[in-house]
Image (tube, rainbow, N blue to C red):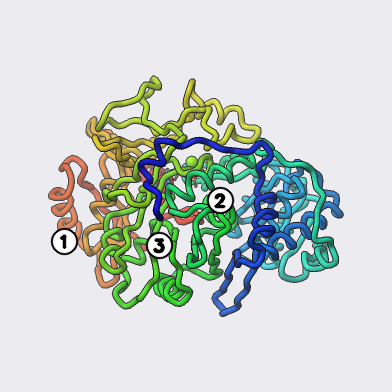
Amino acid sequence: MAVSYTDERDSFEWDIPAAYNIPAVIESHADSFGDRIALRFLDSDGRRAERTYDDLRRDMNRFANALESLGVEKGDRVIHLLPREPDVFAIQLGALKRGALLVPSSSMLKPKDIEFRANDCNATTAVVHESLVGMVDEVRDDTPLERFVVLGGDADRWTQFAELVDGESDRHDGPALAAEDPMSINYTSGTTGKPKPVLHRHRWMRCFELVNAPYWWGVTADDDLSDELLWATTGTGWAKWFWSPVGVGLTTGATQFVYAGEFDPGTFLNIMEQEEVTRLCAVPTQYRMFAQHDLGSYDLQLREALSAGEPLNREPIEAFREAFDVTPRDGYGQTETVALLTNYPGIDVKPGSMGKPTPGLGTTIIDEDGAEVGVGEIGEIAVPVDSPGIFDGYYDKPHLDEQTFHGDYYRTGDLASRDEDGYFFFEGRADDIIISAGYRIGPFEVEDALVSHEAVAEAAAVGSPHEERGSIVKAFVVLTDGYEGSDDLVADLQAFMKAETAPYKYPREIEFVEALPKTSSGKIRRIELRSQERE
Ligand code: ATP
Ligand code: MG
């Protein structure tokens, strides 16, 4: 990339056309380069599929027509539960083109989760893969759902996707869509409690194109993308899918790779090598597992590696640098936002930092009274409310809006500090901060130091109630293969920690566990460990 990110940042302007919407972007890509491959798909059985931008346009319009014939109107909620499949883009784009409000949901949801979401946002249409219809059938009568479309096969009382789109026109004359029209209700990951319904407008995708694409992925729609292959390993129901596969891949007209199969570090590395992936976006759990693997035996074409969703530890950053000469670049944001902080292309990465504010958002750190804090001080990450790159509110949840929108700022609930060079450092979610003998301790710092010990594969630190100190730092540790938990190892790890971090942060208690409690998107749920400690 020839642009200088520092110069461009200074002259950044939001350019969001009033009629912006992602289906129109696909129409325009198909007009300009219809035979470019949008999607290269592979699954764990070796099944392959490809979709060009022409294919996407055709399939999007056919599905929009099909939804119209079922009676779906502008503003109706269409919920989907789909594993990674070649037709997912067509389904998402088709529903949007019909003017529906998309409710992306993870294929890992259980019946009670589906019931909660469908009722919470009043979803009337469900598009579900055949392997998951049973989950919906269990609760369908307790929801407002009326229309049921099954992808991939047949199911009793479900309309088959393939039949539905067969013979539909390749054009859809649907409702006019505007950048400020509601686009989707994305539920948050539920790391700290019940998932929250985030209402986004079509401009969200444009903001990704203007921010995430250049200032994180290092691509723009004007680049020659012919030798690029983007791979974001996320699932179709998460905000991450809209952050990257839709928000960067489709908006810029890139070619992207989607793999349907379980995560396994060796498999994923083989695939990266064989498919010649040039830009990868994965989550820290995956990077931590890559780092446990022998990276030296892979010959990758990788140019950029990105991480988001949780703090990225130093260890995988160093492992990737050494093996591939690529520095994983962390980025920070939420279901509610675009990337607020990134290690943008070309930045001098300081391991442990989430990077610097992206242009145009005004991301800063404030104290409880809403005043910006100084260098080195811990406060809450916040974004001015009038920034187009954040949502306008939760769907039908005024009490949640009240908790998060304060005066001039949207408060993220995440604590951080900033150094003299403007780099942000994650301290933890406000709820996860451990207060021990008057000290405020961010769990990430403890975990990051622990993981740098060769015996530790993963760790989670929480406060455990303690009579004198209020709470003490307790670490739950998953050991690397070949190590076994013992009192000696506890003592070793504690001595190691006292040397690595300020002594008041060392874990006074260490418990060895087989696995850490996680959300289905792979985030550590400290809330579960905390409540376990309280009992
Ligand atoms: P819920 O809001 O339901 O508790 P969640 O906040 O995990 O779930 P997401 O919107 O998927 O739902 O995740 C956003 C959160 O993930 C951020 O608020 C932050 O806590 C964490 N996060 C994201 N990126 C990073 C990062 N690079 N470093 C540290 N934490 C991150
Ligand atoms: Mg959240």
Nearest to the eye among marks 2 and 3: give it: 2
- Residue type, label 3: Gln
Residue 247: numbered disc: 2
In primary-sequence order, the first of circles 2 and 3 is 2
**Image quarter for residue 391?**
top right
Report the Cα–Cα distance between label 3 and label 1.
29 Å
Question: Which numbered disc flags the more N-terminal residue, 1 or 2?
Answer: 2
Identify the residue under disc 1.
Answer: 488
Task: Using a 10 Å C-alpha cutoff, classify the residue at mark 3 as few (fewer than 14 neighbours), some (14 to 19) or many (20 or more).
Answer: some
State the mark number for residue 197: none
Residue at the location (47% across, 42% down)? 192
Camera-nearest residue between 510 and 331 = 331
Q: In terms of image quadrants, where is residue 477? A: bottom left
3D distance between C-alphas at marks 2 and 3: 22 Å
Residue drawn 32% across the image and 78% down it: 297
Residue type beneath disc 1: Asp
x 40%, y 62%: residue: 286
Query: On residue 286, which mark appears?
Result: 3
Q: Which percent across, then down, holds residue 451?
A: 27, 57
